[in-house]
Image (cartoon, rainbow, N blue to C red):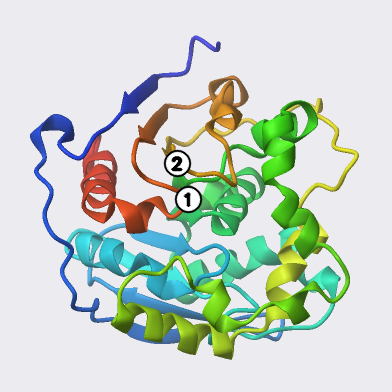
Amino acid sequence: MLLSNTIRTIAVTATFLGWSVIPVRAEDAKVTHHNAHNDGVKIHYATAGDSGPLVVMIHGFPDFWYSWNEQIKALQSTHRVAAMDLRGYNRSDKPKGLENYAIPELVSDVVSVIRDMGEKKAVIVGHDWGGMVAWQFAMMQPEMTDRLIVLNLPHPKGLNRELANNPDQQRNSQYARNFQQPDAHKQLDAERLIRWVKGEAKRAKYIEAMKRSDFESMLNYYKRNYPRPPYKEDISEPVRLNMPVLLIHGLDDWALLPGALNQTWEWLDSDLTLVTVPGAGHFVHHDKPDFINRTLKMWLMRDR
């Protein structure tokens, strides 16, 4: 363990630090819609908040900018928030070809949003594939990363290690191997993709967004970037991050097992806050929105 690291590990419940559970309000965040452009690719994003540091939020699979609705409402009084549609999803462009879904392209989409907002850096927040983009953004664009927040996506080296050595993670990643097969997108439909979404009004928004999305493009993230068997542990020297990192993980996530969180502190030269959330699954910010909101606000406001 690096002595320069400060590690805060918190196992949480719904009443952590005396915070009571507040029912999630049904209304939507009031947002303004924009388009950034990255080498001819339109990237749609929604914004809220008039002042404060910029927070860029990046969704995962199968999702869209609205995934962060509750977090936008929680942060908009203290931050400017921009929630992206990843390329391939909803109102963003859907370029053809695996090469258009390589990590450098996805990272440059985030750069385009930050610049379109007139800023030079931002707090980067990502979930699932958005978490992978967030990790890589911080490694490739450290000067543009004020702070890093990742939900239910372990450090890439941790995920690689578990895929190489953990039979449970290998078995639970069968879905990814299925997605990597030719024509796998033809097996998908909007209704099946959003079975995890709760509430009729919310489900209707998701069905509409998935129908605007391109399933082949969505699976290109897996085909281009997800490890393939035979899995091998990444033993290369890590790109060490120097900005504060908040890592949140719902412990009921069957797709990404929490063992991958181990040793994260060994790959950072920065302050790490690790929050594990019992009773929450892969979509931790949907399962425990009020707790996640309070955690984000507390962490973002410290040392300010």
Which residue shows up at 76% across the image and 52% down it?
226
**Quadrant hosting residue 52:** bottom left
Please name the amino acid that badge 2 sits on: Asp
The residue singled out by tag 2 in the image is 252
Q: CA distance from mark 2 to mark 1?
A: 7 Å
Whole-percent x and y of residue 271?
43, 27
> Which is more toward the observer, 248 or 142?
248
Which residue shows up at 34% across the image and 69% down it?
198
> Which is more toward the observer, 171 or 67?
171
Whole-percent x and y of residue 202?
33, 78
Whole-percent x and y of residue 183?
84, 76
Whole-percent x and y of residue 157?
69, 33
Q: Earlier in the sequence, mark 2 or mark 1?
A: 2
Which residue shows up at 64% across the image and 61% down it?
107
- Image quadrant holding the N terminus, namely top right
Residue 153 seen in this snapshot? yes
User: Badge 1: few (under 14), some or many (20 or more) residues near its Cα, within 10 Å?
Assistant: many
Q: Is residue 252 left or right of residue 202?
A: right
The answer to whether mark 2 and mark 1 are in CB contact below 8 A is yes
The residue singled out by tag 1 in the image is 282
Above or below, 123 relative to 49: above
Please name the amino acid that badge 1 sits on: His
User: Badge 2: few (under 14), some or many (20 or more) residues near its Cα, within 10 Å?
Assistant: some
Which residue shows up at 24% across the image and 76% down it?
29
Residue 102 seen in this snapshot? no
Above or below, 6 relative to 148: above
Q: Report helix, strand or loop for mark 1.
A: loop
